[in-house]
Amino acid sequence: MPTFLFTRAVPNALRIAIVGLIATLPMPLLADEACTLANDWCVPFVGCLEDGSLHFVGRTHGRRDGPLAARTSQGAQCTGTWKRTIVGAGKASFSCDDGRAGKVLYTYFDAPTGTAVGRGSTETGERLIFFSGRAIREFMSADGTFDPDLIGCVSEALLS
């Protein structure tokens, strides 16, 4: 992983405080219906520009491929598709009603929390990181190596 996403300079007390905050946040949903595997394999996700300036909150549907829907912290609505590749990685592409569009490749899966991590970029070159699963808070808490700005962005996304 790129070194700009990791930091060892963050004091443990700050890291613990940020992780504690994440653990108390409610998980957002885009629609009134519950996002469960029983609901057409619905899985929640959050994503951020790597500089922490914008976040996405959404959900996917389908077991191996399907639609995705999200909203940004600036209020844009996004839609797209995702699919699992033959080697187990995941690909997603999206476009938003504010003109932003991008692609994400999920290449890491954390088995203990069931969280998939993907990286990508928008068409204008903004770097993205996305987390998909039911235990994103737990994954961020257990990992402990993400940059505080990224943790802050994910925290904000989970609050929205």
Image: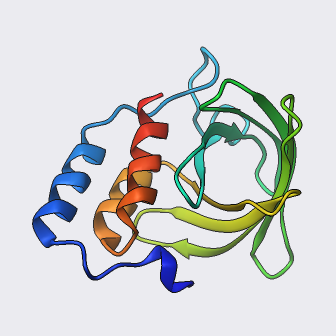
Q: Position of residue 89 (x, y in %)?
A: 75, 74
Residue at figure coordinates x 29%, y 61% from the top left: 141
Q: Position of residue 25 (x, y in %)?
A: 32, 36
Q: Position of residue 56 (x, y in %)?
A: 63, 41
Q: Is residue 129 left or right of residue 60?
A: left
Query: Relative to 128, does residue 66 appear above or below in the rendering?
Result: above
Query: Relative to 111, does residue 54 appear above or below in the rendering?
Result: above
Query: Relative to 85, does residue 34 appear above or below in the rendering?
Result: above
Query: For the N terminus, which image quadrant?
Result: bottom right
How many numbered marks, from 0 up? 0
Residue at figure coordinates x 75%, y 41% from the top left: 61
Looking at the rendering, which quadrant does residue 71 occupy?
top right
Q: Nearer the viewer, residue 83 or 96?
A: 96
Residue at figure coordinates x 24%, y 53% from the top left: 18
Residue at figure coordinates x 49%, y 72% from the top left: 110
Looking at the rendering, which quadrant does residue 125 occupy?
bottom right
